[in-house]
């Protein structure tokens, strides 16, 4: 009689453990993508919007992906007029708010790529949060176009020579 109860208890424990690791239903991901890196580049960034419709603040505390050996959370900071990238321990996702991971700001850094990525490929990323929950993301690899800022054309006679 005890054996079926033990088996039932173990099965229930396994179900509850899986539930505890499931994503917080208040969290959602929008517009995930990975920047296509130049050939032989050892790293690239992943970007997205993390929305939190819940009543509790959340923190993104880690990320993992099979496409790189190292995955870190990063931010760009202005240090004495020089933009520098720094690893951060977490990224806040405020209640009823969002965290925007974008170039020049917070992002997920994929370092020591296992192989070059190709445009259109998808990259699986697992996001880990402070409550122990995880969220699976599939991000498309996109080539970002770098454009020069446009300035109005000068009119005849405006040059200073």
Image: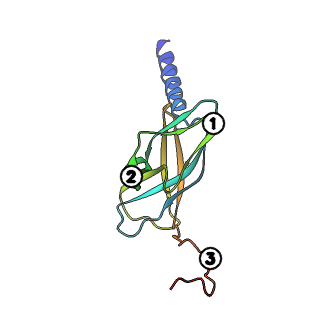
Numbered disc in front, either 1 or 2: 2
Q: Which of 122 and 6 is in front in this view?
A: 122
Q: Residue at x 48, y 61 (%)?
A: 35
Residue 26 - label: 1
Tag 2 secondary structure: loop
Residue 158: name its quadrant.
bottom right
Decide which of tag 3 and tag 2 comes sooner along the chain: 2
Check if mark 1's residue and mark 2's residue have beta carbons within 8 Å: no
Q: Which residue is drawn at 50% across and 18% down?
A: 4
Q: Is residue 98 above or below residue 56?
A: below
Decide which of tag 1 and tag 2 comes sooner along the chain: 1
* Residue 75, percent from left and from top: 44, 49
Q: Which of 6 and 111 is in front in this view?
A: 111
**Residue 123 appears left or right of 57:** left
Residue with the mark numbered 3: 152
Q: In this view, does 22 lie above or below 142?
A: above
Residue with the mark numbered 2: 80
Numbered disc in front, either 1 or 3: 3
| Neighbourhood count class around disc 2 (C-alpha, 10 Å): few under 14, some 14–19, many 20 upward | few
């Amino acid at each position: 009689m005890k054996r079926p109860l033990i088996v039932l208890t173990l099965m229930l424990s396994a179900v509850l453990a899986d539930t505890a690791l499931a994503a917080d239903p208040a969290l959602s991901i929008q517009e995930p993508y990975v920047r296509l890196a130049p050939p032989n580049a050892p790293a690239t960034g992943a970007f997205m919007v993390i929305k939190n419709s819940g009543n509790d603040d959340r923190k993104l505390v880690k990320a993992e992906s099979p496409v790189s050996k190292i995955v870190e959370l990063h931010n760009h900071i202005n240090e004495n007029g020089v933009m520098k990238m720094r690893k951060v321990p977490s990224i806040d996702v405020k209640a009823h708010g969002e965290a925007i991971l974008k170039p020049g700001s917070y992002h997920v850094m994929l370092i020591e790529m296992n192989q070059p990525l190709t445009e259109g490929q998808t990259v699986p990323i697992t996001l880990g949060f402070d409550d122990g929950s995880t969220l699976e993301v599939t991000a498309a690899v996109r080539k970002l176009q770098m454009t020069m800022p446009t300035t109005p054309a000068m009119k005849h006679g405006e040059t200073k020579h």
